[in-house]
Image (spheres, rainbow, N blue to C red):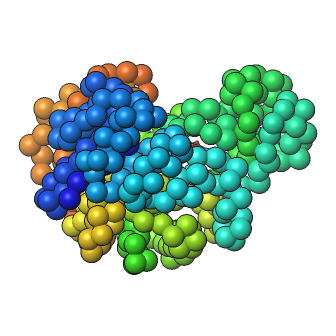
Amino acid sequence: MIVGILGGGQLSLMLAEAAKPLGISIVFIDPAPDACANRVARQILANYDDPAALEQLADLADVITYEFENVPSESVRILSRRLEVYPPSNALATSQDRLLEKNMFVELGIPVPAFKAIDSLDELREAVTKIGLPCVLKTRRFGYDGKGQAVIRSMDDVNAAWQSIGEAPAILEAFMPFEREISIIAVRDPEGNHRTYPLSENIHNNGILAQSYSRNDDPFFDQSCQYVSRLMDTLEYVGVLALELFQVGETLYANEFAPRVHNSGHWTIEGTSCSQFENHMRAVAGLPLGETEITGRSVMLNCIGAMPKVSGMQGLSGVTVHDYGKSPRDNRKVGHITLNAEDDDAVEELLAIVQRNIS
Ligand SMILES: Nc1ncnc2c1ncn2[C@@H]1O[C@H](COP(=O)(O)OP(=O)(O)O)[C@@H](O)[C@H]1O
Ligand SMILES: [Mg+2]
């Protein structure tokens, strides 16, 4: 079986690594000659909307998936004429537009921060007075890792915020005073079977994920599970989906969902017997889904900008360093480190050792 992927970044790399023992090989399109998945998979070097490259991908592959949500919808349409594309196009279209995404959460009865669609500076001014301060302006499309966002703390920030997002169609959201940010990662197969991983608790710096902690037996698991199941069933979803939530008091508010494997689930590689990457491959290839239970506790630390010196921690039991082989660049995710131990105390101890080694 050959799975075709749009995108050849680290998610594609880890999908290809998980695919190998299943007897699945990967071919992917990526316009970057140094795309990091090319270490383990065959690359078609082309833009995502190159018709000849899309035909070549469809010739080679048995099924198609993607590793990021900003793939051109026209490319997905072209590929869908010849092969199944998973996750389905309605999930992709909804996650590409923050307004459609928020409206879907509302339709499904999932709480969201107060929000308003914004198409002009006047609408923005009026919405700020309605929603209140502080609030966050986000472009409807193409945002990731906190890009295309501006926090508005006073009326004086409004003009600069509007300009900073390029005056693009946007939504304004209430800024949530959350206790925790969590995500739930789940997988659904074409028959509608679900599996759900334990919650991840996530720490962001400047809108970029920095750390994820596995949270077994979290009191918010059942609620999160209901929300993600509702979303996946409505979308007739196939593959892995991540739902990001804010916990404020006893309420969970949906932030966004990603129709793909997610950075906050990287700990599932070492922390569970069947990682999010393997389960995504299983779902799109029509294989039975694997177990999602965690053995112990896991913490994932993102390496952002450049890889730290890891020689001091490489032999440590319970520490796994993933270097994506990407060249250093500000705010770029270039690798991650996973820590695994039997309980919270042991994983905290390991974390202290690793953090001493990093700094
Ligand atoms: N309404 C909000 N209230 C508080 N913090 C927010 C809000 N929206 C986003 N953030 C912060 O910014 C991060 C990135 O925003 P998000 O909407 O998830 O965009 P993306 O991950 O696509 O860049 C969130 O994980 C959260 O830490
Ligand atoms: Mg996010």
Number of labelled discs? 0
Q: Is residue 246 left or right of residue 122?
A: left
Which one is in front, 292 or 239? 239
Q: Residue at x 36, y 53 (%)?
A: 64
Image coordinates for residue 267, horizontal then vertical, percent: 30, 54
Toward the viewer: 84 or 331?
84
Counting from the top left corner in percent of width and height, residue 131 is at: 83, 47
- Does the image show residue 155? no
> Where's residue 257, x and y in %?
54, 55
Q: Is residue 312 left or right of residue 58?
A: left
The structure residue drawn at horizontal position 15% and vertical position 54%, both measured from the top left corner, is 20
Q: Residue at x 27, y 74 (%)?
A: 288
- In x, y percent, where is residue 62? 28, 57
Compared across the picture, whether 108 is left or right of 20 comes to right
Asked whether the viewer can see residue 4, the reply is: yes
Where's the N terminus, which quadrant?
bottom left
> Residue drawn at (47%, 42%), measured in percent from left and top?
75
Quadrant (top left/top right/bottom left/bottom right) for the C terminus = top left
Is 132 located above or below residue 36 in the figure? below
Displayed quadrant of residue 119: top right
Q: Is residue 285 above or below residue 53?
A: below
- Residue 172 placement, left or right of 204: right
Pick out the residue farthest to the left: 315
Between 158 and 10, which is closer to the camera in this rendering?
10
Eyeballing the image, is 119 above or below 352?
above
